[in-house]
Amino acid sequence: MANSDRPTTVIADVYRGTFIHSTQTTAVQILEDALLGVDTQGKIAFIGKGKELDKLSQTFGFSPSAVTQLKQYEFFMPGMVDTHIHASQYSYAGTALDMPLLQWLNTYTFPVESRFKDLEFAKRVYTHVVKRTLRNGTTTACYFATIHTDASLLLGQIANDFGQRALVGKVCMDRNNSVKHYKETSQESQEETCRFIAELLNKKYPLVKPVVTPRFAPSCTGALLGQLGAIAKNNHLHIQSHISENTEEVKLVKELFPESESYTDVYHKYNLLTDKTVMAHGCYLSDKELDLFRETGASLSHCPNSNISLCSGMLNIRNVLNHKVKLGLGTDVAGGYSASMLDAVRRALDTSKVLTIQDPDHDTLTFEEVFRLATLGGSQALSLDDQTGNFEVGKDFDALRVDVVAPGAPIDLIQNEDPKILLEKFLNLGDDRNIVEVFVAGRNVVPFTEPTD
Ligand SMILES: O=c1[nH]c(=O)c2nc[nH]c2[nH]1
Ligand SMILES: [Zn+2]
């Protein structure tokens, strides 16, 4: 090949085997004996057929002997996207699920979150949650931290150090909190949000971004919501919050914001519904509110474990999808007790099946659709689908290498199964022992190379 014809991309790694991902039109697309090349920037440079090895190796200038071959019963799938997780609640995940949302916040959540003033405590919890989620296949996480700016910055640093793609939010709340040392004024909240954004952006972490984070309407005055909407707009930032999770909360919002037509209208009025907004839950949104989500491009994070654990409600995903609202899945640790997105996949399917038990006409979600929600759907919900979510050329290589028969893992394969069955078994039965490697932007981040604590 003449010098001038040489591609400018330099290939760092090439993998050969089965790749399973979603596209806009196909919930599960299976590419058997495929070849995928990753460039030195961590981006997918090509995806082709194994039999095209000679041609691809010449075009992209790599040696066929450097290709990593997957084993039988292994496949690559896109890394999973947790669109809603409270990193600061990880210490009590798996406990404290015996009361409804508003009581749960005052009894368990605010007292624990107030401890993140202590940076040593913050470091311990945040290191654990980043490692736990990464090894369970969460390559992108949208995190709530606490009101503490320095601890929130530390969460960004830890995600960066371990190589996880993350949106990190310093939580804002200037009212309705009974816990003495867990409060901020609207001025403090606004100033500290600006400091958080400036300092985090200044670090220039390649995969970690700030997200403007009003906790939810009952925790924020209209004045603070308005200031946060302006900060997000002026800096083109992501926004996250909660909406319509339980009936008591919806009633409270009506009382606190009597001038607003609906809960969604409260956020809309303060410019908090944009195409970079993700709202958790939405169990009780009306069709009109869903229309407003679609019009503004805002998305929903479905957190089924939390919705059941706190007896909040059940989101009708089919109705959300029919309204063409962007949707991803979230663990919502610690209202949700599991930090694993595989659990979110299973609970999403369970919830949809319960809705079918209640109404046999309900169009139950398929496992293929839920796979898409956990990957491509999540990346769309976070407006990061230009970078991650599937194996399209030009996106970052965020991937899980899954071995369905990994030693010690909880899956028995009795017969030779096709790749779609392998995916279904992994989603329903697998765990982190099946996730033998995790890649984010081409970098191998699991198994960990750092000393573990
Ligand atoms: O599930 C939830 N967890 C929280 O921490 C929270 N705060 C407001 N609304 C919330 N919902
Ligand atoms: Zn939440």
Image: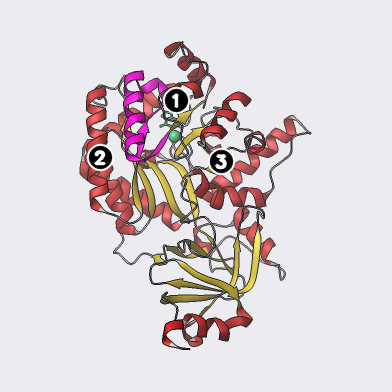
Q: Are marks 3 and 2 in contact (CB under 8 Å)?
A: no
In the picture, which quadrant includes the C terminus?
bottom left
Q: Position of residue 339 (x, y in %)?
A: 46, 46
Query: Label 3 vs label 1: CA separation?
Result: 17 Å
Figure quadrant of residue 21: bottom right
Residue at image mark 1: 267
Find residue 199 and report its image quarter: top left
**In this view, 358 is above or below 198:** above
Provide the secondary structure element on which disc 3 rests: strand
What's the CA distance linking mark 1 and mark 2?
22 Å
Q: Which residues are magenta?
A: 211-240
Q: Label 3: which residue?
A: 326
Identify the residue at horizontal 74%, vertical 38% (top origin): 363
Which-is-in-front pick, marks 1 and 2? 1
> Which residue is the extreme one toward the right?
361
Q: Position of residue 104 (x, y in %)?
A: 42, 26
- Of the numbered discs 1 and 2, the one sitting upstream in the chain is 2
Q: Amino acid at mark 3?
A: Lys
Residue 425 position (above or below residue 364): below
Identity of the amino acid at label 2?
Answer: Phe
Above or below, 403 relative to 260 = below
- Looking at this view, name the residue that lies furthest to the front: 4
Which residue bears the numbered disc 2?
196
